[in-house]
């Protein structure tokens, strides 16, 4: 049976624009994986890897106008947002090149023999090696930063792992263009173009996770799709690591004192965060615990005013629009759920922002209102009004794992008075990033960043943003009593590569 065509679709109209490719067959997936596997040796030299990553960033920047135009045609995210995202992607590639040059990610540890220890210590030398071919599943909402040249690809290449990318159906034409740029950059450094493979189609994604030469996978998407791939990765004859970002509610807790101090500021900030990018950020605040009473009323009025002034926007595709409208309808049918600003259809192809309000007491115990504790992708948030601290704490205890958790405190609470420290401790088990008096949208690419969290936010304890994302694609190996002449250069006593390491218990830089 002939493979189905892959079309570029305009989200503003829902109409097909052009045929980009055809869905990959099982044979084509196999060819892409084997080409990537054969390219592994070309990434052995860290100098080559770093140069490749920097050249990739340079070539992406040089093609900026063409890439942004293609991305906007397929995502409707707008040139300003996309230009910034491309800049972020290029910065990320260069940041990983710096990490490769530094070499600390190899975690070199050398222990010489010590017969006086109990038990005696032999000659041991440990460092990390790349896993092999990494399958990358692109995200819809970040066509640059979490797609073909995004963080999974950049960190995998930095680790020395070739990639095969499963293109997202929302931006197939852009995916082809970016893959071509990466392959051109690879060729400039003698790296085979197969180091970055690209396949299209749902079945291709299934074939990819099961391929015996795929050693690990990175995924950003839905709970349903990610869990299916996670289960498939675990069910293989040889299971592989699956680093999936599946979904997040990103709860916000606003204390009564914080609302009394700056209700209008918090309400306006919440509106900006939950509508940013038409509510299509993975760290959108989707659930808010706000106090009852006069201060809480002021906060909701501010939120109402700001959200009401937000223009309707286009979601990434019509399937997402349909799911958003269905999700809103299902939630508003629950008794007691109000919609001070009703989210919904803004036009034939757009959606309007809004928020829902519900008494927090309805969420204290398991029941039909648990639907409000599930992510709804798009410009909407749920505000649960709590009567007292005990009720807010009871709801917090029922929340699933998240990428972020935010608390808004008063000035005194932020200085350590009252329940400030206690609230921070209560939020820490819920998320990988805990914010105080700020908003979760905006994930800085920085060494200390952590973009991950307890399930279902992610399927592992790793991060997909920041320098430590490279650790996902490495495994440690130790050599015992290996003659110096047989050891890799990274583990030799004279340290010919000048790597930071721990040598006989002492850290050397």
Image: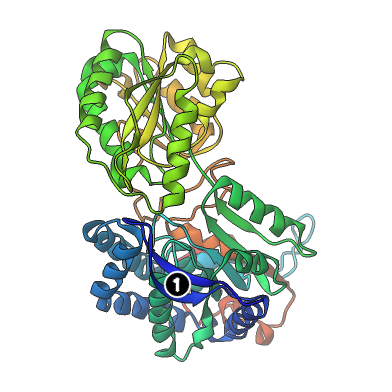
Residue 492: quadrant of the picture = bottom right
**At 26% across and 69% down in the image, what residue appears?**
69
Q: Is residue 175 left or right of residue 258?
A: right
At label 1, counting other C-alpha atoms closer than 10 Å, the crowd grade (few under 14, some 14-19, many 20 or more) is: many
Name the residue rendered at 25%, 57% in the picture. 78
Residue 232 shows in this picture = yes
Can residue 111 be seen from the camera position used here? Answer: no
Is residue 303 rendered to the left or right of residue 247? left
Q: Position of residue 418 (x, y in %)?
A: 37, 14
- Percent across and percent down for residue 324 are 43, 40
Q: Residue drawn at (48%, 35%), measured in percent from left and top?
A: 327
In the depicted view, which residue is nearer to us: 34 or 503? 34
Left or right: 354, with 326 as reference point: left
Q: Is residue 149 above or below residue 485?
A: above
Residue placed at 63% from the left, 49% from the top? 227
- Looking at the rendered structure, the number of numbered marks drawn on it comes to 1
* Residue at image mark 1: 100
Q: Nearer the viewer, residue 196 or 331?
A: 331
Which corner quadrant holds the N terminus? bottom right
Location of residue 505 in the rendering, given as x and y in whole percent from the top left corner: 59, 60
Nearest to the observer: residue 474 or residue 241:
241
Q: Secondary structure at mark 1?
A: helix
């Amino acid at each position: 049976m002939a493979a189905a065509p892959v079309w570029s679709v305009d989200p503003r109209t829902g109409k097909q624009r052009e045929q980009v490719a055809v869905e990959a067959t099982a044979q084509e997936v196999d060819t892409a994986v084997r080409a990537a596997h054969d390219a592994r040796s070309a990434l052995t030299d860290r100098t080559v890897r770093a140069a490749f990553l920097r050249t990739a960033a340079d070539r992406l920047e040089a093609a900026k106008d063409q890439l942004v135009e293609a991305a906007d045609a397929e995502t409707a995210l707008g040139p300003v947002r996309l230009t910034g995202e491309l800049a972020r992607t290029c910065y990320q590639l260069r940041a990983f090149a710096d990490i490769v040059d530094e070499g600390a990610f190899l975690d070199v540890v050398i222990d010489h023999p010590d017969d006086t220890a109990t038990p005696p210590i032999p000659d041991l030398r440990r460092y990390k090696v790349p896993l092999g071919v990494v399958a990358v599943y692109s995200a819809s909402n970040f066509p640059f930063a979490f797609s073909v040249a995004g963080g999974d690809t950049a960190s995998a290449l930095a680790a020395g792992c070739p990639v095969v990318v499963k293109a997202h159906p929302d931006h197939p034409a852009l995916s082809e263009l970016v893959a071509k740029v990466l392959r051109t950059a690879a060729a400039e450094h003698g790296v085979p173009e197969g180091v970055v493979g690209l396949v299209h189609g749902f079945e291709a994604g299934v074939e990819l996770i099961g391929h015996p030469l795929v050693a690990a996978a990175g995924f950003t998407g839905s709970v349903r799709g990610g869990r299916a791939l996670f289960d498939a990765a675990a069910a293989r004859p040889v299971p592989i690591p699956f680093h999936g970002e599946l979904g997040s509610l990103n709860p916000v807790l606003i204390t009564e004192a914080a609302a009394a101090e700056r209700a209008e500021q918090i309400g306006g900030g919440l509106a900006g965060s939950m509508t940013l990018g038409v509510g299509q950020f993975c760290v959108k605040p989707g659930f808010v615990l706000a106090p009852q009473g006069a201060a809480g009323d002021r906060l909701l009025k501010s939120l109402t005013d700001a959200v009401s002034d937000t223009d309707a926007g286009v979601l990434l595709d019509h399937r997402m629009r349909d799911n958003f409208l269905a999700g809103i309808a299902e939630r508003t049918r629950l008794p007691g759920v109000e919609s001070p600003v009703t989210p919904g259809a803004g036009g034939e192809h757009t959606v309007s922002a809004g928020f829902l309000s519900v008494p927090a007491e309805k969420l204290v115990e398991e029941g039909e209102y648990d639907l409000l504790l599930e992510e709804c992708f798009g410009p909407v948030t749920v505000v649960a009004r709590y009567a007292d601290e005990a009720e807010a704490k009871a709801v917090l205890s029922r929340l699933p794992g998240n990428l972020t958790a935010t608390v808004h405190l008063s000035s005194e609470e932020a200085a350590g008075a009252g329940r400030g420290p206690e609230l921070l401790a209560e939020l820490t088990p819920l998320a990988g990033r805990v914010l105080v008096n700020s908003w979760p949208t905006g994930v800085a690419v920085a060494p200390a960043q952590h973009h991950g969290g307890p399930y279902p936010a992610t399927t592992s304890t790793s991060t997909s943003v920041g320098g430590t994302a490279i650790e996902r694609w490495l495994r440690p190996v130790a050599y015992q009593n290996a003659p110096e002449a047989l050891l890799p250069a990274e583990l030799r006593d004279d340290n010919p590569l000048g790597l930071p390491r721990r040598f006989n218990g002492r850290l050397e830089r």
